[in-house]
Image (cartoon, rainbow, N blue to C red):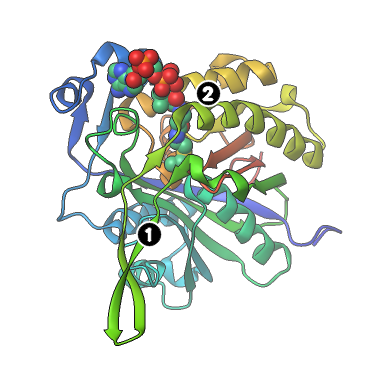
Amino acid sequence: MNQLGVGIAITGSGSATPDVSLDNHQLSLMVETSDEWIKSRTGIQARRLADAQVSLTQLAARAGKNAIAMAGITPQDLDLIILATSTPDDLFGTAGQIQASLGATQAVAFDLTAACSGFVFAMVTAAQFIRTGTYKNVLLIGADILSRWVNWQDRGSCILFADGAGAVVMQANECDRFLGFSIRSDGTQYKYLQLAYVPQNQELVKGIEVGKGNFQPIVMNGKEIYRFAVQKVPEVIEKALFHANLTTEDIDWLLLHQANQRILDAVAERLKINSAKVISNLANYGNTSAASIPLALDEAVRQGKVKAGDAIAAAGFGAGLTWGATIFRWGRQS
Ligand code: ACO
């Protein structure tokens, strides 16, 4: 233990996506749009979509299993499972079902919701438990099935969102590899991106009503979210780098929430980070919300791009509004 507390390492990654892929051309048969428009405005070419037979629990458990295997531990070694999601199978929480599915009998499991920042917020939450010596082995999963909540008639948003799951294992480690973070929220701007519950009065007995309603499909002001992301994400990365005592020059990989290629490019440009260091897989997967960062990380690790010891600046942003960044080195040792 150093003066900060117990050291932390990110030792395994995993991911899972539904088999079904919908490309831009197929989307253009549903709403007035084109492959050219979507590609040039977002960089997205196709997205994976879950049908009714696919559950969030299944995707998340598959991603988690892969991450556990890469970390070289067993489900019984896990002390904690955090599921970052906005689209649980059960509003009471879905992490418990994942715990049961993995057979992680010793782990406590809970959900955490911070939209597309969920995975970064979960990393920071897990780090607190490890730093203080409370837990040693934590599985974090970011998973979302946003297709269930998209308005498929709204061409301004249905082109973006998709389904998937990604996971990492964070462990207590002699050498500290979790170098810095900064997380923020601004609820005054919540209206720019909502998946809101809209209650309608139902009378139980005379004079007593309850608000029984439904969640309404996603409503987004794309321009405002774009503006917010391009301004706030570089700021929060700079802040996390300051806490890590590093500069952008020390960073090997910029790993942003995969929302829009133009946002990725603009953030990299503001931070003066070379585009070769920007991890991007949104062309094939679209915006998978809480899953997008670990999904892109897992792909880059398995392709051999991200290597042990590489310094990564990860940043999420989205509904809430929420945003945040973590700085870490991949793997147990350099
Ligand atoms: N196909 C064709 N035309 C379209 C489409 C479409 N799919 N969507 C909008 N248009 C039209 C608009 O109607 C508009 O036409 P008009 O000028 O005649 O009114 C024109 O294209 C320009 O529309 P804008 O909304 O200005 O397009 P913009 O360049 O801003 O791109 C986009 C829209 C892609 C949504 C962009 O604003 C964006 O990516 N914003 C960020 C959104 C985001 O990342 N959200 C997720 C956050 S993460 C989370 O928490 C879930």
> Is the residue 314 above or below the residue 15 in the image?
above
Q: Residue at x 67, y 72 (%)?
A: 134
* Mark 1 Cβ inside 8 Å of ligand 1: no
Separation of residues labelled 2 and 1 (CA atoms): 31 Å
Figure quadrant of the C terminus: top right
Q: Is residue 155 left or right of residue 81?
A: left
Give whichever of discs 2 and 1 has the lower sequence position. 1
Q: Is residue 84 visible?
A: yes
Does dot 2 land on a helix, a strand or a loop?
helix
Q: Is residue 296 left or right of residue 58?
A: right
Tag of residue 197: 1
Q: Quadrant of ligand 1?
A: top left
Q: Observer-nearest residue: 214 or 276?
A: 214
Is 33 drawn above or below residue 207 in the view shown? Answer: above
Quarter of the image where one finds residue 45: top left
Measuring 78% from the left and 40% from the top, which residue is drawn there?
Answer: 244
Viewport quadrant of the N terminus:
bottom right
Indicate the position of residue 103 as horizontal and vertical percent values.
Answer: 35, 72
Q: Is residue 172 visible?
A: no
Residue wearing tag 2: 264
Frontmost residue, 15 versus 193: 193
Does 25 appear above or below 131?
above
Q: Looking at this view, name the residue that lies furthest to the front.
A: 207
Which residue is at the far right?
Answer: 3
Where is residue 177? Give x, y as percent: 69, 46
Q: Amino acid at mark 1?
A: Tyr
SS category of the residue bearing label 1:
strand
Q: Amino acid at mark 2?
A: Leu
Cβ at disc 2 under 8 Å from ligand 1: no
Kindly indicate the quadrant of the structure image that contains residue 242: top right
Compared with residue 131, is residue 230 higher up or lower down, i.e. above or below? Answer: above
